[in-house]
Amino acid sequence: MNPSTKFWDKIAERYSKQPIADEAAYQKKLEVTQDYFNPDMEVLEIGCGTGSTAIIHAPYVKHIQAIDFSSKMLEIAKSKAEAQNIKNITFEQSTIDNITVEDETYDAILGLSILHLLNNWEEVIIKVYKLLKPGGIFVTSTNCLGDTMKWFKIVGPIGKFFGLMPFVKVFTTKELENSLINAGFNIDYQWQPSKDKAIFIVAKKA
Ligand SMILES: C[S@@+](CC[C@H](N)C(=O)[O-])C[C@H]1O[C@@H](n2cnc3c(N)ncnc32)[C@H](O)[C@@H]1O
């Protein structure tokens, strides 16, 4: 078993019960995202966790392919969608690297609280760009720890070694913006609720 999967499987139940840290910011991000949606859209969510955001967005689009590599997260996500009678989400256990659909498949890709958990986050941005149709959007909320917590580069691996933390990659907002732009995206919307919070970006494929 991949050690990172083990971490997320272990915390899935607790994660699903945690209240949203900043409800107002979460609602704003949902609204901004939904302004881009239309009922014909094919959406991919990478690292969907327990499915809460996909379930909220599902009524506004045609279909959401929601992937996560943690089977425990997905079990919870599936049962929540079933309980709410949501039929247009397909949950699939997959890493992001293993997605094997054709290029230009999706109208929108959501990557919420996930890029900073990926060692190859820059490659993932390039892959996301390829998977989007022209004019498609990548919606991401990302903790750029390099802005305010550079020391995390030292503490993070220790926490991971003891199984207390998942793998976390430290990079800055500037590095994130540059990676998106270098991949070919235009940044269409950008917002950060406050300095120490995740940066929310809607990037459009040119
Ligand atoms: C912090 S949670 C975010 C969940 C959800 N997007 C949200 O905003 O609540 C990160 C999720 O990404 C998943 N994950 C981490 N690395 C992954 C990878 N390489 N491939 C697929 N899923 C991954 C974890 O299992 C976990 O469910």
Image (cartoon, rainbow, N blue to C red):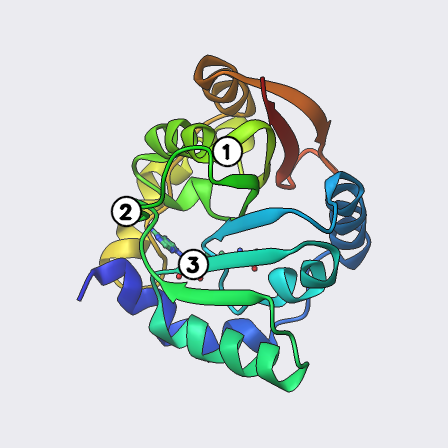
Percent position of residue 94, x then y: 32, 58
Query: Alpha-carbon neighbours of circle 3 within 10 Å: few (<14), some, or many (≥20)?
Result: many
Assign the C terminus to one quadrant of the image: top right
Separation of disc 3 and disc 2 at Cα?
A: 26 Å
Percent position of residue 80, x then y: 59, 80
Q: Does mark 3 have its CB less than 8 Å from ligand 1?
A: yes
Residue 171 is tagged as: none
Q: Does mark 2 have its CB less than 8 Å from ligand 1?
A: no
Select label 1 or label 2 by which is in front: 1
Image quarter for ligand 1 equals bottom left
Percent position of residue 117, x then y: 39, 46
Query: Alpha-carbon neighbours of circle 2 within 10 Å: few (<14), some, or many (≥20)?
Result: some
Percent position of residue 67, x then y: 43, 58
Separation of disc 1 and disc 2 at Cα?
A: 33 Å
Type of the residue with mark 2: Pro
Instruction: Give the vertical position of 84 relative to 140 (above or below).
Output: below
Quick one: which residue is furthest to the bottom in this view?
Answer: 83
Q: What's the residue at 77%, 59% (across, down)?
A: 23
Type of the residue with mark 3: Ile
Disc 3 target residue: 67
* Secondary structure of the residue carrying numbered label 3: strand
Q: What's the residue at 36%, 39% (across, down)?
A: 102
Disc 1 target residue: 132
Q: Observer-nearest residue: 202 or 136?
A: 136
Do the CB atoms of the residues marked 1 and 2 lie less than 8 Å apart? no
Q: What's the residue at 82%, 54% (across, down)?
A: 24
Residue 157 is tagged as: 2
* Secondary structure of the residue carrying numbered label 1: strand
Assign the N terminus to one quadrant of the image: bottom left
* Secondary structure of the residue carrying numbered label 2: helix
